[in-house]
Image (tube, rainbow, N blue to C red):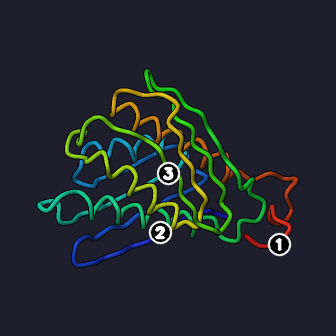
């Protein structure tokens, strides 16, 4: 059965549609109007081996906040939809990923209970037209919309571009691990019987 999520969301500030296939090959078709954000989402798809389509427009004349946060909400909802009943998945994923000066740890649990912990630090307010502070808002939105427990730890890093890209790639690898099916898991990996 195909594990695909497709979610559309329209508000007075943004119009967003996301489609994700958890069993893809890393193909991405992303257009948000923010070049750096597109680059990060392309990295997420490529390194997680997810097929991802993101079409997002919004009030970028204000700033990038609404569009980035709302994209996180919709991506989280699409992930949750694609996971279905979560039977057979490994549930947990983690990665410690290096990128030049940056070393980022990402760990997650597709538990059905949202929680978010994050300690990335940046020296500049912007990467291109992307506000570095929006990194937190994006991942917070994903974690709560997908009902996942998501942790980031910055073990080292000086260059903001490297730190953010490393976080997206680490998230991709952790998600790939957590969403993989394990033939030993015949139901869900929980003593409760549901996730």
Residue 192's tag is 1
Nearer-N-terminus badge (2/3): 2
Badge 2 is on which residue? 6
**Circle 3 residues within 10 Å: few <14, some 14–19, many ≥20:** many
Q: Position of residue 89 (x, y in %)?
A: 74, 57
* Left or right of 178 on screen, residue 192: right
- Which part of the image, by quadrant, shows the C terminus? bottom right
Q: Position of residue 7 (x, y in %)?
A: 44, 71
Q: How many marks?
A: 3
- In the image, residue 113 above or below residue 11: above
- In the image, residue 156 above or below residue 18: above
- Which part of the image, by quadrant, shows the N terminus? bottom right
Viewer-side residue, 5 vs 112: 112
Q: CA distance from mark 2 to mark 3?
A: 12 Å
Residue 79's tag is none
Nearer-N-terminus badge (2/1): 2
* Left or right of 185 on screen, residue 174: left
Viewer-side residue, 3 vs 96: 96
Residue at point 53%, 45% (across, down): 152
Badge 3 is on which residue? 51
Q: CA distance from mark 1 to mark 3?
A: 31 Å
- SS label for mark 2: strand
């Amino acid at each position: 059965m195909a594990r695909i999520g497709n979610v559309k969301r329209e508000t007075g500030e943004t119009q967003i549609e996301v489609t994700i296939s958890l069993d893809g090959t890393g193909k991405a078709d992303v257009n948000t109007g923010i070049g750096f954000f597109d680059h990060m989402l392309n990295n997420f798809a490529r390194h997680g081996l997810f097929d991802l389509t993101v079409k997002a427009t919004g009030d970028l004349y204000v700033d990038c906040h609404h569009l980035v946060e709302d994209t996180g909400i919709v991506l989280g909802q699409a992930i949750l939809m694609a996971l279905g009943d979560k039977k057979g998945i490994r549930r947990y994923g983690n990665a410690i990923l290096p990128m030049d000066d940056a070393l980022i740890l990402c760990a997650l649990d597709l538990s059905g209970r949202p929680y978010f912990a994050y300690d990335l630090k940046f020296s500049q307010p912007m990467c291109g037209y992307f506000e570095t502070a929006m990194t937190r808002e994006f991942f917070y939105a994903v974690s709560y919309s997908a009902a996942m427990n998501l942790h980031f730890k910055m073990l080292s890093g000086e260059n903001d571009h490297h730190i953010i890209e490393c976080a997206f790639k680490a998230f991709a690898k952790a998600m790939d691990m957590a969403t993989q099916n394990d033939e030993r898991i015949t139901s869900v990996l929980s003593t409760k019987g549901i996730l």
